[in-house]
Structures are given as C-alpha cells and as structure tokens.
Image (tube, rainbow, N blue to C red):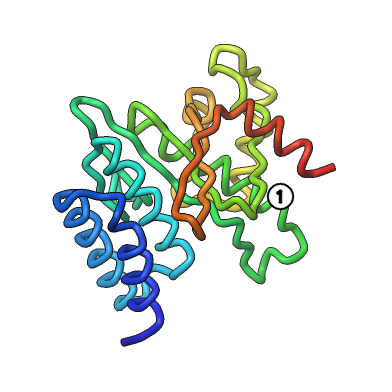
C-alpha cells in the first residue's frame, strides 16, 4: 500500500467518530474516488486531504458532495447540493510551479481571480478553501458587489487573468458578475473548518502580512 492510500485512509478514519454510518459511507466513497484519480496521476495528496476535510464539513451539514466534478468542460474541486441549492468549493493550497518562481504573488493572485470568475457562475454559492498556513490574497475587485466594480478595475483583472489563463480566456462579463461568498480555512491537523466572511478574512490577512 503506497503513502497516498495510507494517508487517505488515516484521515478518513480520524474523521469517522464525527459521522453517522451514512455520512461515513459517503466520505469513504469520496476517498475511493480520489484514490482512483491518484492512480491515474490526476491528483496530489495535500490537495486531496483538504478536499476530504471540506467534504466532511459539508456532509455533516446536510450536503450531497461530489469531488473533482466536471462543469461545462472544466473540473471543480467540490460540487455540493442541498435541496435546490448548489455550492462550489475550490481548494487553494498556495502552490507555485517552478516556472513562476520569479512572479509567485502575481501568479497566485491570477489563479485566485481565475477560480472566482470561472466557477462562481455555476452555483448559488462559491467558496474558496485554504489551509491555515497559507494567507490567501483576494483581489480587491471581488470584495465589492458586482454593481460597484468599475470598467477599469475589471479590465485590469482581465489583464491579470490573461497572463496565465487563456484556454478558454476569461471574459469581461465573467469578471463583472463573479461572486465570492465566503472563505474556509482548513486545519488539516484537527480536520476542522472555519468559515469566514471575505472582508473579515482579508482584515486578518492584512494583519498577518505586516
């Protein structure tokens, strides 16, 4: 048994006492889904563990959860439904590829912006999830309601996204209408989640970056 499978089993067993039998079975099915994807070299362990912790939180709150779910030709990390409501959670670990070693902050800002714009239109609620040890920066334009975003702000954000994400290109309208509803911080060690209002999170992020 390789380390990926061992770690996945450990974290699911760690969360088992919080779940009833039905919820535990749902989480095990998601573990199996991620293991299958790992065997195809499509997922990594840190990201997958965080997806499972988020999934546990959502399952406990009555959601039906799919992991690595395809929407309109692109795959989102978590797609959850509850009644007629839908929610997408994208996990952002702060990983920077070697080719972006000289522009890590710009690259991460572009990635966060692209996730908000690409996915938020496909669900009633869109959330970014990040580990406690990474302080995520949210471009200021997404802290405003869409009606208060200026054309200049939107165009600057499109230029940022176009530096890194052009297949397909992100549109002016997607940026104008994108919404970020909340942020999850993930404590992997304790398998707990804290949900933040985005302005509250960014206020804390400003202090962390002093």
Q: Is residue 179 left or right of residue 112?
A: left
Q: Is residue 61 above or below residue 167?
A: above
Residue for point 48% across, 28% down: 181
Residue for point 30% across, 78% down: 39
Check the picture and name the quadrant holding the N terminus: bottom left
Horizontal and vertical percent position of residue 184: 50, 41
Residue situated furthest front in the rendering: 17
Q: Is residue 108 above or below residue 180?
A: below
Check the picture and name the quadrant holding the C terminus: top right
Element under label 1?
helix
Residue for point 28% across, 58% down: 16
Tell how many labels: 1
Q: Nearer the viewer, residue 183 or 149?
A: 183
Q: Which residue is mark 1?
A: 106
Q: Is residue 123 above or below residue 67?
A: above
Residue situated furthest bottom in the rendering: 1
Q: Nearer the viewer, residue 154 or 68?
A: 68
Please rate how many residues cluster around mark 1, counting C-alpha atoms within 10 Å: few if below 14, some from 14 to 19, many from 20.
some
Residue for point 59% across, 44% down: 161
Horizontal and vertical percent position of residue 205: 71, 39
Q: Is residue 159 left or right of residue 195?
A: right
Q: Nearer the viewer, residue 92 or 159?
A: 92
Horizontal and vertical percent position of residue 194: 50, 39
């Amino acid at each position: 048994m390789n380390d990926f499978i061992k770690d996945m089993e450990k974290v699911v067993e760690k969360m088992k006492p919080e779940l009833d039998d039905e919820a535990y079975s749902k989480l095990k099915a998601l573990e199996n889904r991620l293991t299958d994807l790992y065997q195809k070299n499509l997922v990594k362990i840190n990201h997958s563990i965080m997806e499972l912790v988020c999934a546990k939180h959502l399952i406990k709150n009555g959601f039906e959860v799919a992991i690595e779910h395809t929407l309109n030709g692109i795959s989102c990390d978590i797609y959850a439904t509850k009644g007629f409501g839908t929610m997408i959670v994208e996990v952002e670990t702060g990983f920077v590829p070697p080719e972006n070693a000289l522009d890590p902050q710009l690259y991460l800002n572009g990635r966060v912006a692209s996730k908000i714009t690409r996915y938020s239109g496909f669900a009633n609620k869109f959330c970014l999830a990040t580990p406690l040890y990474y302080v995520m920066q949210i471009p200021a334009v997404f802290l405003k309601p869409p009606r208060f975003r200026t054309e200049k702000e939107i165009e600057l954000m499109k230029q940022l996204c176009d530096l890194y994400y052009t297949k397909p290109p992100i549109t002016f309208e997607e940026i104008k209408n994108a919404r970020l509803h909340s942020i999850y911080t993930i404590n992997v060690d304790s398998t707990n989640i804290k949900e933040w209002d985005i302005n509250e999170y960014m206020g804390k992020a400003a202090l962390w970056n002093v």
